[in-house]
Image (tube, helix red, strand yellow):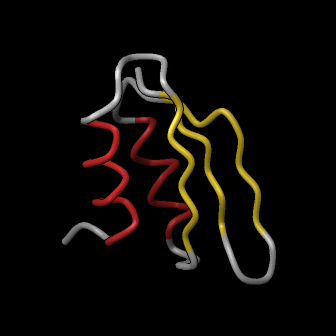
Amino acid sequence: MCPMPLLKAKLALNSLQPMQILKVIATDPGSERDFHVFVEQSRHSILAFEKDDSSYRYWIQKG
């Protein structure tokens, strides 16, 4: 089963043009692993990643 933040991000990326950037904010600690694996298996890339005590933020560029 696909984690919800990743599923929502995949759907949002589908609506973007190549090279556009999607900002994702997640609260699930597992999202860190999930998003890095996802971009390794796709044409997309993580341009930036930040985390603090309550959230994980990703800037993903559509490939």
Q: Quadrant of the C terminus?
A: top left
Q: Is residue 54 above or below residue 31?
A: below
In the image, 29 versus 23, the foreground residue is 23
**Residue plotted at (61% across, 42% down):** 59
| Occupied quadrant, residue 5 | bottom left
Residue in the image at 32% along x and 59% along y: 8
* Residue at the limit of the structure toward the bottom, as seen here: 54
Residue farthest to the left?
1
Q: Relative to 4, is 62 on the left or the right?
A: right
* Residue drawn at (35%, 35%) of the image: 41
53 shown above or below 40: below
Q: Work out which quarter of the rendered image holds the N terminus and state it.
A: bottom left
Percent coordinates x, y for residue 29 in the rendering: 58, 77
Q: Furthest residue to the right?
A: 52
**Residue 14 rendering spot, x and y as whole percentages:** 25, 36
Q: Position of residue 31 (x, y in %)?
A: 50, 66
Q: Residue at x 32, y 46 (%)?
A: 12
x, y percentage for residue 54? 72, 82
- Tell me: 45 left or right of 18: right
Query: How many discs mark residues in the rendered view?
Result: 0
> For this rendering, which residue is in front, 61 or 29?
61
